[in-house]
Image: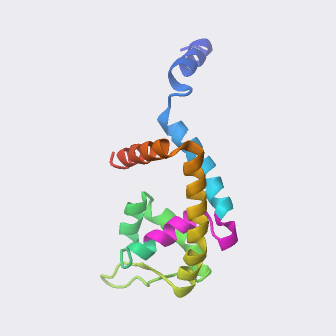
Amino acid sequence: MNRKTVIETLRRDVAGQCVAYKMREATRKLSRRYDEALKPAGIKGTQFSMLNVITLLEGMTLSELAEKMGLERTTLLRNLQPLERRGFIKLSEEGFRRARTAEITDQGLAVLEDAIPLWQGVQATLKSEIGAQAWSDISSSIDQFKDL
């Protein structure tokens, strides 16, 4: 393909149609909104999600946790380390035939207690901005992608 053909193909077939690009763009914008809303609690949206999952799935191994969150285990561990340093979670030691786990601490629960109303606020704002039906449709569509 020559330059002109590539550009025409991009305009006709890719621009505005690439679901992966659209989802990444939307995710970046949403992440900024959640990060801003959660700032008073001292955490970011990704950290809120991790604390949430760790709390709800207590005792799950790091490998299982990574699988649940759609992350590589090393990426998960790298993202958990700041939460551990701040005392929000406790990572177990790895031992013979014992996989590492993450556990929420009392300090982590306190942060979640502060963060939940902030999260609820940004959720309500976003839902109001796009409308209840679009909110429901988007949520259902995302669930379908998660199952691929």
127 left or right of 98 in image: right
Position of residue 72 measured from the top left corner of the image (x, y, whole percent): 44, 60
Residue 87 falls within the magenta-colored stretch: no
**Magenta span dominant secondary structure:** helix
In the displayed structure, 98 sits above or below 127; it is below
In the displayed structure, 104 sits above or below 15; it is below
Quarter of the image holding residue 82? bottom right
Of 90 and 124, nearer the camera is: 124
Quarter of the image holding residue 113? bottom right
- Tell me, yes or no, if residue 119 can be seen here: yes
Q: Give the residue drawn at x 60%, y 53%.
A: 125
Outermost residue, left side: 97
Q: Give the residue drawn at x 62%, y 65%.
A: 44
Residue 41 falls within the magenta-colored stretch: yes
Of 42 and 1, nearer the camera is: 42
- Tell me, yes or no, if residue 42 can be seen here: no
Report the span colored magenta. 38-53
